[in-house]
Every structure is written in C-alpha cells, then in structure tokens.
Image (cartoon, helix red, strand yellow):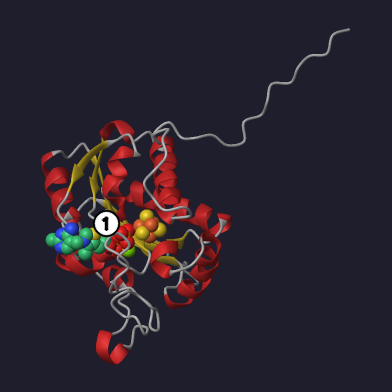
C-alpha cells in the first residue's frame, strides 16, 4: 500500500500586492509591517484595481515601489488635498493616503484638518513614529516629552518645544470624521488589531460614510538610537502617551433605544 502524501498547509504567504523585492527601510522599521497590512486588507476587500493611493514625503516616499497600486506622489504634507481632488473627479475610485507624523502633523496640519472637516471620502493611514525619520531624526509634533532627537539633543522639554500633539483625538471630534482609531505594531496581537482598524476605515469609505483615519504607532530604531528589538519594546511606553483603540466610529449602527416600559 502506498502512502498518500498530504499537501503542505500554507500558513502564511506574501500578498500578491506586495512586490517581491527588498525595501530601502532600515532593518526592523515598522513601515514594512504596515505595507503588508495594507496589501492584505486591499486584497481581502478586492479593492486594488480601483485604488489610487497618495504617497508621502518621508521614509515611505517610495511606497509606490512596494505596493502594486496606482499611486500619486504628493508634495510634503499635501496628501489629503491631492486625495480630495482625485476622489472628487474619480468618484468610483478608492482613495488612500499614507503619511508619516512629520508629513501629517507638522507641514500638513492644515490639509489633514480641512480634509477631515469636509468629511472627504478618503481613508488616511497615519504612521506615527514620533520623529522625522527620513531627514535624520529631528523632533516631530508627536515626539514624546524627554525624547532625544537631533533637534532636542537633551530631550524634548515642554517649555521650549511644546507638548506632543494628539492629532487623531483632535480630528475625531470633527463631525466629518466617520472613523478614527489608533493601533500599534508593537507585537503580533496589536498588529492584528491594527489590521482590523484599517479594514474598518476602508469600509467607511466604501459605505460613503465620510473621512476615516487610522493612526499607527510605529518604531524608528535608527532615529530613536535603539536596536530593532529595543524599539519594539519601547512602543509600550509610546502607547501610554497615545492610548490605543477606536476613538470614534460614527458609521456603527445606531443603538436601538430601549423600549419604554409599558409602551
Ligand atoms: C516642503 C518640504 N519641507 C521639508 C522637507 C524635508 N522633509 C522630508 S521628509 C521630512 C519629514 C518626514 O517625517 P515623517 O513624515 O514623520 O516620516 P518618516 O520619515 O518618519 O516616516 C521632512 C521635514 C521636504 N521634503 N519638503
Ligand atoms: S529612518 Fe526610521 S522610519 Fe526611516 S526607514 Fe529607518 S527606521 Fe524606518
Ligand atoms: Mg515620522
């Protein structure tokens, strides 16, 4: 009797949307994890053929080399304005922005606030690594108090450099914002939750519900002066300053009021 070979069970594979090549990111950088999450979500929702993504200026400037989508490159900070134009002239498209914290929370503050305020039908991915990674590790608005950067070499001090700005909380109060959440890439359970947030933010656009944003706490081992492992562990400190979870979900079905007694 001949033994029947059991076909190997595939546990994980590379999403087709993710280009099969090495990236320019530093070893251990969170941008790569986030690219993979996006590829998985867009594949699962079968959105890739009609997606137009807007790339940032920052370390993710070459995102268009790694995710096989149609991309437009925006000037630094202007991704939400570029996305607004695309979404309005191509209403059948699915429009995604990808921005770092320097891009979204510093030079692009006006663009993100007004796109959110208008309730533009775009899905914004906001990668908060608390630093200007690309340009050599300067302070960003999101930098933690006490954090050493090349422009705050003795640590960020509120008197001179102000307090960290919680962008997503600020955006969440705007009525045009349908969904706002904050995830993290600190470990596999958090990465799984972040993927669910990205999916929810994509569905908000598909439902025509309004602007959706997912902030993702990410690491920058080089800018933080840490090993990749240390930087992942340090994310738990960042999570204390920027709490994780869904900040607002106005697209959730309205809760039915409890029936009045005797009614
Ligand atoms: C108009 C303009 N001002 C400044 C710069 C320089 N610059 C390039 S990337 C960057 C900051 C990027 O930081 P972030 O958005 O947090 O992305 P990261 O590299 O950390 O992923 C800056 C200031 C630029 N390219 N264009
Ligand atoms: S500088 Fe930081 S954000 Fe940029 S690729 Fe390196 S680790 Fe990633
Ligand atoms: Mg950054």
Q: How many marks?
A: 1
Viewer-nearest residue: 191 or 177: 191
Please provide percent x and percent y for residue 231: 50, 65
Q: Is residue 178 visible?
A: no
Task: List x then y, in percent, for residue 5.
Answer: 76, 17
- Reading the image, the residue beneath label 1 is 58
**Image location of residue 138, percent across then percent down:** 29, 71
Instruction: Give the answer, above or below, for where 55 lies relative to 222.
Output: above
The residue depicted at 46 percent of the width and 61 percent of the height is 184
Taking the spot 89% from the left edge, 7% from the top edge, the residue there is 1
User: Residue 37's spot in the image, x, y percent?
Assistant: 44, 46
**Circle 1 residues within 10 Å: few <14, some 14–19, many ≥20:** some
Residue 165: image quadrant is bottom left
Whether residue 146 is visible here, answered yes or no, is yes
Quarter of image, res 12: top right
Q: Specify whether 26 is left or right of 53.
A: right
Q: Report which quarter residue 53 is drawn in.
A: top left
Q: Residue furthest right?
A: 1
Q: Quadrant of the C terminus?
A: bottom left
- For image coordinates 38% across by 78% down, the residue present is 148
Q: Would you say 27 lies left or right of 105 here?
A: right
Query: Residue 167 or 64: which is nearer the viewer?
Result: 64
Q: Secondary structure at mark 1?
A: loop
Up/down of 248 relative to 237, above or below: above
Camera-side residue of 261 and 142:
142
Task: Indicate yes or no: mark 1 CB to ligand 1 under 8 Å.
Answer: yes
Q: Quadrant of ligand 3?
A: bottom left
Residue at image position (34%, 38%) is 67
């Amino acid at each position: 009797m001949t033994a029947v070979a059991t076909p190997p069970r595939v546990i994980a594979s590379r999403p087709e949307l993710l280009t099969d090549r090495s990236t320019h990111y530093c070893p251990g950088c969170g941008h790569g994890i986030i690219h993979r999450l996006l590829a998985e979500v867009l594949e699962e929702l079968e959105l890739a053929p009609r997606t137009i993504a807007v790339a940032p200026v920052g370390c993710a400037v070459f995102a268009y080399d790694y995710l096989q989508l149609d991309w437009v490159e925006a000037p630094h900070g202007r991704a939400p304005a570029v996305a607004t134009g695309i979404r309005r002239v191509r209403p059948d498209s699915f429009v995604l922005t990808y921005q770092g914290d320097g891009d979204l929370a510093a030079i692009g503050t006006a663009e993100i606030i007004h796109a959110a305020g208008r309730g533009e039908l775009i899905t914004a991915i906001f990668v908060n690594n608390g630093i200007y990674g690309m340009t050599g590790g300067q302070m960003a608005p999101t930098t933690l108090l006490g954090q050493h950067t090349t422009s705050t070499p003795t640590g960020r001090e509120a008197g001179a450099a102000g307090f960290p700005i919680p962008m997503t909380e600020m955006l969440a109060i705007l009525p045009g914002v349908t969904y706002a959440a904050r995830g993290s890439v600190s470990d596999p359970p958090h990465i799984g939750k972040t993927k669910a947030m990205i999916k929810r933010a994509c569905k908000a656009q598909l439902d025509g519900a309004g602007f959706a944003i997912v902030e993702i706490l990410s690491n920058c081992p080089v800018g933080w002066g840490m090993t990749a492992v240390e930087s992942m562990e340090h994310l738990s400190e960042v999570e204390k300053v920027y709490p994780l979870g869904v900040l607002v979900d106005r697209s959730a079905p309205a809760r039915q009021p409890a029936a009045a007694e005797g009614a």
